[in-house]
Image (tube, grey):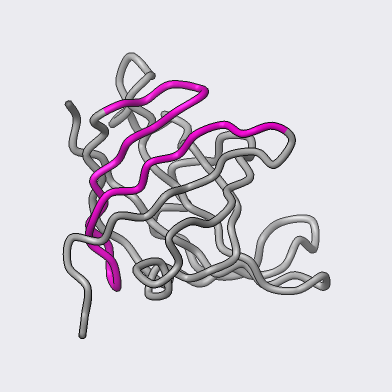
Amino acid sequence: MHTLATAILEHTTDQGVHHDWLIEDPSLANPYAPDARLWTARFIPPPTHWPGLGCFELEVLPPHRRAYLTYQGPVRANRGRVRRVASGLVVAELWSAGRMRLFVRVDGFEGIIDTQLEQPLGHLARVEPAFQAD
């Protein structure tokens, strides 16, 4: 199992606001290489809301450049702006195209995210918080 860097960006566009989740991709020969692309998915709820959700949808996107782990600002070609709202680490217990089980520790959330490809929705992420506030 690899410990992987991750970042969550709030992405504001003309169509509204969503979040982009970026994770170093352990399926690559060297996920830590400077030119390694990042696994990327789009979703709506910020990680501070995950503990109370039970699940949420993820739309897997094409891999993004590693620079987005730390980048904040305008996105090329008038595609809006990004602002990092969380960063941290992921440990991938299981990583495949159809399912991932991740231990996630980011600002605002710590616990398990278990994703499964559920057509036609895309990935459904099930949330298992490490602890639940009373």
Q: Which image quarter holds the N terminus?
A: top left
Range shown magenta = 94-119
Q: Nearer the viewer, residue 100 or 53?
A: 53
- Residue 123, placed above or below residue 104: above
Q: Nearer the viewer, residue 123 or 71?
A: 123
Q: Residue 3 appears in which quarter of the rendering?
A: top left
Q: Position of residue 122 (x, y in %)?
A: 65, 38
Q: Which image quarter holds the C terminus?
A: bottom left
At a point 57% along the width and 31% down the height, the residue shown is 117
At a point 63% along the width and 45% down the height, the residue shown is 59
Q: Main secondary structure of the magenta part?
A: strand
- Residue 77, placed above or below residue 63: below
At a point 42% along the width and 74% down the height, the residue shown is 49
Q: Position of residue 8 (x, y in %)?
A: 44, 60
Q: Residue 54 appears in which quarter of the rendering?
A: bottom left
How many discs mark residues in the rendered view?
0
Q: Residue 79 appears in which quarter of the rendering?
A: bottom right
- Residue 5, placed above or below residue 55: above
Considering every residue shown, the one lying at the far top of the view is: 29
